[in-house]
Every structure is written in C-alpha cells, then in structure tokens.
Amino acid sequence: MDSCIQNEKYVEDAEIERQLSFALEVKRHLSSDSRFSDSAPKYYIQTLGCQQNEADSERIAGLCRLMGYEETEDPASANIIFVNTCAIREHAEIRAISFIGEYKHIKDNDPSVIIGVGGCMVTQDHRSDKFKNSIPYVNFVFDTGSIHKIPELVLSSLQGQKRKFLTEKDFRIAEGIPSYRKNAHTAWLSIMYGCNNFCSYCIVPYVRGRERSRRSADVIEEAKKLIDSGAKDITLLGQNVNSYGKDTGEGVDFADLMRMICRIDGNFRLRFMTSHPKDASDKLIEAMAEEEKIAKHFHLPVQSGSDAILKKMNRHYDIEKYMSVIEKLKASVPDVSITSDIIVAFPGETEEDFEKTLSLVEEVRFDALFSFIYSPRIGTPAADMSDQIPKEVSRERFARLMDIVNPISLERNTRFVGRTLRALAEEQGKNDPRQITFRADSPRPIHVYADKNMIGNFADIKITKAETFSMNGEIV
Ligand code: 5AD
Ligand code: SF4
C-alpha cells in the first residue's frame, strides 16, 4: 500500500525515457539543419522569482543541452527562449509580461525563434487562457508540473505543429531530468515540492500543488554528486522544508536528512529554505547547533507581528510561539543569523497591528528582512477580503518599516567587525571586478580584494567594515 502511494507521486520512468528520447530526436533534427553546421543552436532562459524557479531553470537548461542547444547570454542571438515566470506578487507578473513582449521583437526579426513560457504565472488558468487567446507568438506554455515534457514541446514546435498548452496541473516528482548548474561551487538542491499550508494570501499551493518529498536516497545521491563535482555551498530547497518526509513513509524527517547529508565526506556547507514557524522543531535547532557543516543561518518568515493578522493569514502560530522558537534558536546556536519575511498592509491590518510588527522587528533584530507590500492574488481567500488597505497607507507603512529595519541590519553586520569568519569565495564583484564576493554563514555578501582563482574556495576573512547590506573584509 505504502509503495503504491509512493509511486503515484512520481512521473513514470517510461514517461521520462520517452521525453529523453524526444530530446535526442530534437538533437538529430537540429544537427540536420544547415543553419547550425558552423555554430550550435542557442538557448536563453529568463528566470523570475524564487530559488525554486532558479532550480527549475537549471533543469530547463539541462534539457536544452541534451537537445543540442548551447547557452547564450543575449536573447537576440537565441534560437529558443524560455521565460520561467513567477506569480507571488503582481510586480513579478508585470515583469514577466514585459520580458515576453520584448522577445516578440526578436521573433519579428526571425520567425523561426521558439518562445516557451513556463512557471507559476502560467500555471494559473486565467493567465494560460490569455496566452492561448491573445499572445500567438508564444509557441508553447507549460505549467510547473510539466517541465520534463519540454523535449516533446520543442520537437512539436520544430516540426511546425500547433501551439501547445500543458496546463493540466499534474504535479508529480520527475526524477532523472538533467540539471545544468552554471556555477559548480554553489548549488540549489530541491528536496520537496509544493505546499499544503494555504496561507490566505499565497498563490503557491495553487501553482505548485500539494507537498511531496523526494526519497531520501535520491536526495543523498544528488548531494554526493554535487559535492564530488565541487559544490561547497548547498541550499536544500522546499516551500516548507520542516515538513520534509511526512509523505515518504521512510521515517526520515528534515533534521535526519540534514544530518545524513552532513555525514558525506567533503568540505562543504549546508543551508536550507524555507521554514514555517509552526513546524520549526527543537530537533532541527539541535541539528543546526551540533552539525558543523550546517550554516548558522535560519530564515524564518514571520509575515506579521499581530496575532489577529496571523490568524487571518491562516498561519497557525501566534507571536508567543514564534518568539519561543527565536529564543530557543538564539540560546542553542550562538551567533546565529536570523532572517525573515514580512507582508505589510495585509487586508484589515490596523495601525495597531502594524505597530506590533514594528515592535517585533525591534525585539528580534533580524540580520535581514525581506518586506513586501501585500499583493492580492486571484483565487486566494485574502484577495476577496473586503478590508483591503489603500495604496498610500501601504506605501507609508512600508517606508516606516524600512526606517527601522535598515539600522538593525547595520547593527547586526557590525557585530562581525574585527572578527575572522570562514567564508566561501563565490563570484567576482559586480561593482568592482578587482573584488571577490565572499559569503560566511550570514547571508550578507563580504567584499574582499582577492585573486579570481580563489573563487570556489573557503578562506578566513577578517571583517574590516560593516554596511547595511554587505561587509568588507580582507584575507587573513
Ligand atoms: N503579497 C505580498 N507578499 C507575498 N508573499 C507571498 N504571497 C504574497 C502576497 N500575495 C511573500 C511572503 C513569503 C514570501 C516568499 O513572499 O512573505 O514568505
Ligand atoms: Fe505560501 Fe504559506 Fe506555503 Fe509559504 S507556507 S508557500 S507563504 S502557502
């Protein structure tokens, strides 16, 4: 019975094999095209949204390479363009639509260019209908459960078949799809997909389906491969990692999984996101305290400082419970960096509710806070609440929150000044190419003048200066 339930969560092996053979057919098709006799066809992927989307785009890239495409950084030189959309807030949807409009001009110049749109935005029916009915230059649309079917979609476009719309929302786990990660030393590793929580403002459960966890053996195998190929910083991904394993029947929960990954030989650091406060367990905090390889950073979205608003948000915890987790965390993991998400101006938020959020932020003193103005999402309960907050009020509250948050971030970063932190050299500096961006356990970047060949290695960095969003340091 258990194995039966287990298998229903997975796309059948035969279907994965079918798609991989379509990928090879695409490759044959492209190699017989004289336009590509001198240079390989090119793919371009525009990714919006969260880390989960980044990880999905790595799978799209893996499939593109299997089909014989090479990456280009310039959409105008691409033969196939993917837009991996986000739906978390209106702003993300507006950006996606604007990118897609830009790519139309590229297709106007070369009608053979294929445009495919996937991700959370088009997993909503009202959006996919719009593409079907009024955006004819998009060749195909695929929901978040159909990424593994990209080879079939590309083949049918190349063969000049009708436009296709895969929006059946068949959310299952597809193992065996290659991922292509641009950067060998930092990696996303999805351990589960979907969400069961239905927070009243959130579109995620509707566009990513119910919670499903990967088998621990599959996760461990992928982690081993990543570490063997040079990954030094691995982030385990899921909408609510604390409930990992509830559906696998293996008896391996998230803390167990983290400890199993820590047992893999190698010099690497483990991170995770995101956690739900209602499920943050003592066992997980203990694992963080005891396991050297787990970064001492906890992202614990609180969303609001008011119990009344948390209730309307359907969050299933109150501030007393949230603070008890924070206190345990601070007591058990010395020097832990804590970050959070907050939604400003949720429907019905009074001035008093908002002030409770400000006091909570003052009390916890987050290392970093990601704040968002509430954005109504069609189909979620909060969008139909009658007491929506006017724009002027939300903007004013958002600005007041920032005034409190930024000095706290600076204060938190200042605690590191004069200390030496073990940090990974991640990439060349974006503002100053003579600098390398390092990262220690805290999520804040550390800018250091260093040689490019340090990238991908850990080093001891003495922190010389703290800013609000970053630090400066020097190699010890
Ligand atoms: N409006 C504003 N912010 C939202 N988030 C999720 N849904 C919405 C919405 N409708 C925020 C939450 C979540 C983060 C990823 O995005 O704070 O933790
Ligand atoms: Fe959205 Fe809540 Fe699920 Fe997070 S836990 S993805 S906020 S429904």
Image: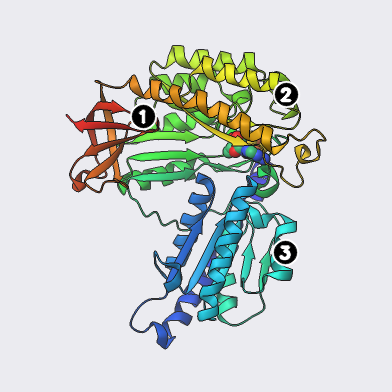
Q: In this orientation, which residue lies closer to the viewer: 139 or 21?
A: 139
Q: Are marks 2 and 3 in contact (CB under 8 Å)?
A: no
Is the N terminus in the top left, top right, bottom left or bottom right quadrant?
top right
**Circle 2 residue:** 350
Residue 400 in the image: state x and y as whole percent: 57, 26
Residue 215 position by quadrant = top right
Three-letter amino acid code of the residue under disc 1: Asp
Three-letter amino acid code of the residue under disc 2: Thr
Secondary structure under the numbered disc 3 in the rendered image? helix
Q: Is residue 13 visible?
A: no
**Circle 1 residue:** 441
Q: Who comes first in sequence, dot 2 or dot 1?
A: 2
**Circle 3 residue:** 130
- Distance in Å between CA atoms under marks 2 and 1: 36 Å
Residue 172 in the image: state x and y as whole percent: 63, 51
- Distance in Å between CA atoms under marks 2 and 3: 36 Å
Mark 2 residue crowding within 10 angstroms, few (<14) / some (14–19) / many (20+) = some
Q: Are marks 2 and 1 in contact (CB under 8 Å)?
A: no
The residue sitting at 76% across, 37% down in the picture is 382
Secondary structure under the numbered disc 2 in the rendered image? loop
372 with respect to 423 (left or right): right
The residue sitting at 55% across, 17% down in the picture is 325
Residue 419 position by quadrant = top left
Q: Is residue 443 above or below residue 164?
A: above
Q: What colour scheme governs how the chains and residues are painted in the rendered image of this protein?
A: rainbow
Residue 49 in the image: state x and y as whole percent: 54, 48
Q: Who comes first in sequence, dot 3 or dot 1?
A: 3
- Distance in Å between CA atoms under marks 3 and 1: 44 Å
